Amino acid sequence: MSNILEVKDLVKQYGDFTAVKGVSFDIKEGEIFSLLGPNGAGKTTTISMLSTLYTPTSGDATIGGHSISKDPMAVKQVIGVVPQDLALYEDLTAKENLVFWGQMYGLSGKALNSRVDEVLDQIGLVDKAKNRVKTYSGGMKRRVNIGVGLLHKPRLLFMDEPTVGIDPQSRRAILDTVKDLNKQGMTVLYTTHYMEEAAELSNRVGIIDHGELIALGTQDELTKQVGQTDTLILHISENEDADALANSLKDMPDVLEATTTDHEVSIITPSAENILASVVSKANERGIKIRSIDIREPNLEAVFLHLTGRALRD
Amino acid sequence: MNKLFLIGIKDLKLMFRDRAALTFMLLAPFILTIGMGFVTGRFSGGSNGLSNIPVVIVNLDKKDLGNALEDLFSSADLADLIEPTASTDPEAARHLIDDNKASAAIIIPAGFTESIIPADGAIDNPNYARPEPVKIEVYSNPSSPTSAGVVKAIVDEFISRVEEGRTSGMTSLVGLMTSGLLNPQNASSEAERLFQNVSASESTAITLKKNTEGADAVDFDILSYFAPGMALMFLMYTVSYGGRSILAERAQGTLPRMMISPTHTTQVLGGKVLGIFFTGVAQVGILILASSIFFQVKWGDPLGVIVLILAAVFGASGWGMLITALARTPAQVGSTGSAVMLIFGILGGSFINLEQMPAFIRTISKITPNAWGLDGFTTLALGGTLKNLTEPITALLIMGAVLFAIAVLIFSRNGLVQK
């Protein structure tokens, strides 16, 4: 399969602050590629440069063979964008929104009307098409937001954290929509800070942190980087000293790393079962009450933790 | 071009779905116009809001028609409206106007009467040559367009009556001679008799009567001033609201979304400007239509009204774009726009006739589209046509073009969206 997107040393600098530090990756036609990283990692800035909204400080990317710097209008014809925040006219109906945005992509007449009807059907809003968007629930608005990005049948769809702040049911519907679109042949660049979404959707994942792409590959390739390790997560009470417990665990045999976030202590170990009793005992010695314990096998969260020493939601 | 209109129409649609904006755009100016109508007594048959217009009359003619015109301005009918002063020196009279001490000077040149009514026995003279027409000069004060317009309307009406009388007299004489009822030898004496009637003070040919159509010419409806005054003031709200929508769209993500679509930045900005323009034209158009229907306000020459609306909205839109370009948030545009609306409303004469303001205020008022727009609408209400609107329309177009250019420069320097 040929590459629909090739990114080379993309940099975005704002004064002394560098938001994106020389990111390079490519996406093959027909795949779902996820950029996984915490808030502020540089995901949206990267998407904004690729969608020609922001000008890169240096570096370039080609989409469908067109340079984002030299031929932005040709790039715009190839891509569809679903922005992180809702970008809709709330005083217009869903249908009016779709018609307007379709016109912005050059659709008109019967082609526009039939495409709007198709998209309304695809996002499941045929019955509510004539209601103003401001009367919709958050999930319905998200669906219209996605629908706008699909109107002109783009070859490459950018979806920037499309499930932020919505209920589980709507989230499920959006993830299913992404899979359907991909089955229909659409290539998707999906950004998220939810490890589960990247794991469920992606053929390949790029992990981004502080503007740098720190890992890239399939899930198997990435988890192999961590090795055959488990992650043991201790949930402790709010008034307990998580840092002190983590520090005391670091010296134990088979504990590769122990970090804290909020009221959790995450321990990376070759075998969670082998150290579980010792860890509980250590907590008891310090008088720390453990509310619950999770054991996780190698996953993208563990990869991120392994690479950065922090959890994804930090 | 097509996308430009699509964006403009979309903005117009959005504006008319915003109830709060509609209240400010249409209801508020309409109610304020009604209020001003009550305050000025328009609805109770009271005054037209104009009184004691200072006029300098220089009567160099000193004969029948010149004296009749001078008497007309001193007549009881116009006593409340006009405050005449006599002068013998045209230059001194013009200086008084230049110094803002009067609204207009009427200079009746020597020979005015004779240019219309031949002197005794003149027609009998075989070498009689009709003198060149002599024109009455109305030297008006540009900073008092309403009052000067009223004075000019009275003079125009006087001249029209004189001309009407002269023409009807000549027609009668020719008719009588053709039919053989009048001996050509008696034509001279008969003509003198007819022209004497023309100049007689009680003749309908030259007298402005309260209850004749002559009264219409000087009967200035105060709502013809306040209705456009309010429309223009709230037009400033509309243009700043429209400008605010650029920043609001930037914040809500629809502007970046437009920029991501295959649409040029110039089309996006142009479409937004067109939206402001469409909305402004719709607002002023609706207010004019409503005041015509509900208050019977006579706006004057329809073509002039249309062109003036377009020019006024263009000039005001320039201000809206400049305010938007200088602001960082929609809230800043809203607060600045409201302040500018009120300041321009006061400075531009929406509440108080500019003629009653000090000279420096009248000078400052020229930066407002309100002042130029009101100047134009007043001219039209007083019977002017499109050709009399050259000055306000040119000023409004220049104002809009300059302000748009500055706004575009600022936008291109700062970027329409963060880059």
Image (cartoon, coloured by chain):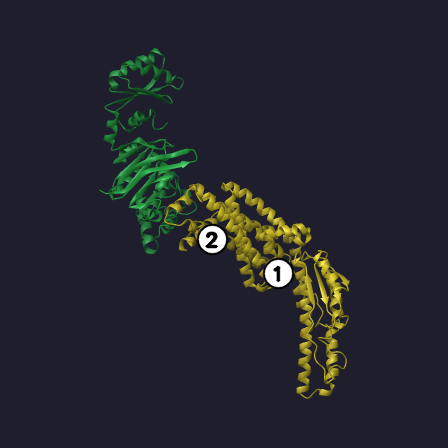
Chain colours: A green, B yellow
Residue at the spot x=58%, y=44% of the render? B339
In-front residue for pair B328/A201 = B328
From mark 1 to mark 2, how far is it between C-alphas? 28 Å
- Image coordinates of residue A83 in percent, x first then y, are 37, 40
Q: Say if mark 1 contacts mark 2, CB within 8 Å.
A: no
Marks 1 and 2, the one that precedes in the sequence? 2
- Report if residue A87 is visible in the image: yes
Kind of residue at badge 1:
Thr
Q: Which of B172 and A227 is in front in this view?
A: A227
* Residue hosting label 2: B274
Task: Examine the rendered structure and indicate whether residue B4 appears above or below residue A209.
Answer: below
Q: Quadrant of the N terminus of chain A?
A: top left
> Does A82 sit left or right of A183 as displayed?
right
In terms of depth relative to the viewer, which is nearer, B400 or B216? Answer: B400
SS class of the residue under badge 2? helix
Which chain is indicated by disc 1? B
What percent of the width, then of the height, locates residue B369?
58, 53
Q: Nearer the viewer, residue B62 or A287?
A: B62
- Which residue in the protein does label 1 denote? B379
Q: Where the C terminus of chain A falls, by quadrant? A: top left
Q: Which mark is residue B337?
A: none
Q: Quadrant of residue A233?
A: top left
